[in-house]
Amino acid sequence: MPPRKKLKIVDIKVSCSNCSLADLCLPHGMDMEDVNALDQAVKRLPPLQPGQHLYRTGDPGRSMYAVRSGCLKTYCTTEDGDEQVLGFTLPGELVGLDGLNNGQYVSNSIALETTSVCNLPYDQLENLCQKLPALQRQVMRIVGKEVANDQKMLMMLGKRSAEERLAGFLVSLSARYKSRNLSATEFNLPMSRQDIGNYLGLAIETVSRLFAHFQEQKLLTVNRRAVVLTDLERLKGMVEGCQLGESAIS
């Protein structure tokens, strides 16, 4: 039999250039047949509209999801009925890993804007990982990165001032957009000030005051949800010693 054709980088860029599953689909050494096998398992779902849930707490945890466009907010509800924001998922990032624990999601995921996602069922992913070692390594790397980033965020939220928390949030967003070949200094915030404050443990009034203060300090300019980071290096300096990964708040 002729050897299986190895997938070239140029082929990857053409076939996966708009795919948010790049971290799963691009392990080195996978060939065209392997990539096609993964592609067969992935289901492209109809776009979610703002306010529409991808899943809710208690739903069967059968899949992980990759965001292709838009943004998801992950949150849980406390015993008192209050919402606690757990994170935000941007294009190219995964959500739904909590469904692996006991077969049920323990959080909610809701679209903040029109959002397209890919569905990767856990049972098919498990079968593919057994056949494709490179894919298994990538999945383990992604899970490990999520754990590490959660730990970094807990450190920041527990030990940092309000200014440092917001600076860290913006620096993390900047890194995540940059990794997607988007501007690291100019972007729209898909989440509200209230969501940001909830996630960072700050009152909405504090978040609004800090944005105004950062603008006065010429660290950024802000117009509603449009943000321009005019001094990214100074913002990074505010969170030195607790640097955040590209998906630290996903």
Image: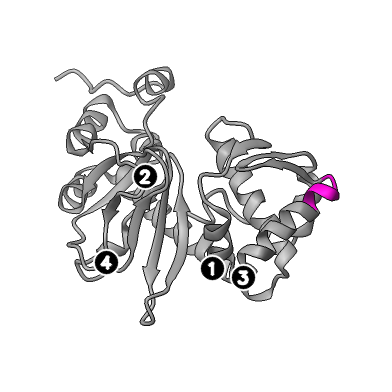
In the orientation shown, which residue stands out farthest toward the bottom?
79
How far is disc 4 from disc 1 in space, using C-alphas? 23 Å
Element class at badge 2? loop
How far is disc 4 from disc 2 in space, using C-alphas? 18 Å
Residue that carries the numbered disc 1 in the rendered image = 151
Q: Nearer the viewer, residue 71 or 154?
A: 71
How far is disc 1 from disc 2 in space, using C-alphas? 29 Å
The residues colored magenta run 214-218
Amino acid marked by disc 3: Leu
Question: Relative to residue 15, is residue 146 depicted above or below?
Answer: below
Question: Relative to residue 131, is residue 86 depicted above or below?
Answer: below
Colour scheme of the picture: one colour
Image coords of residue 38 (percent x, y):
23, 36
In the rendering, which numbered label is found on residue 157?
3
Residue that carries the numbered disc 2 in the rendered image = 50
Residue that carries the numbered disc 4 in the rendered image = 57
Number of other residues with Cα within 10 Å of mark 4, as a class: few under 14, some 14 to 19, many 20 or more: some
Amino acid marked by disc 2: Pro
How far is disc 2 from disc 3 in space, using C-alphas? 28 Å
Image coords of residue 9 (percent x, y):
43, 22
Number of other residues with Cα within 10 Å of mark 2, as a class: few under 14, some 14 to 19, many 20 or more: some
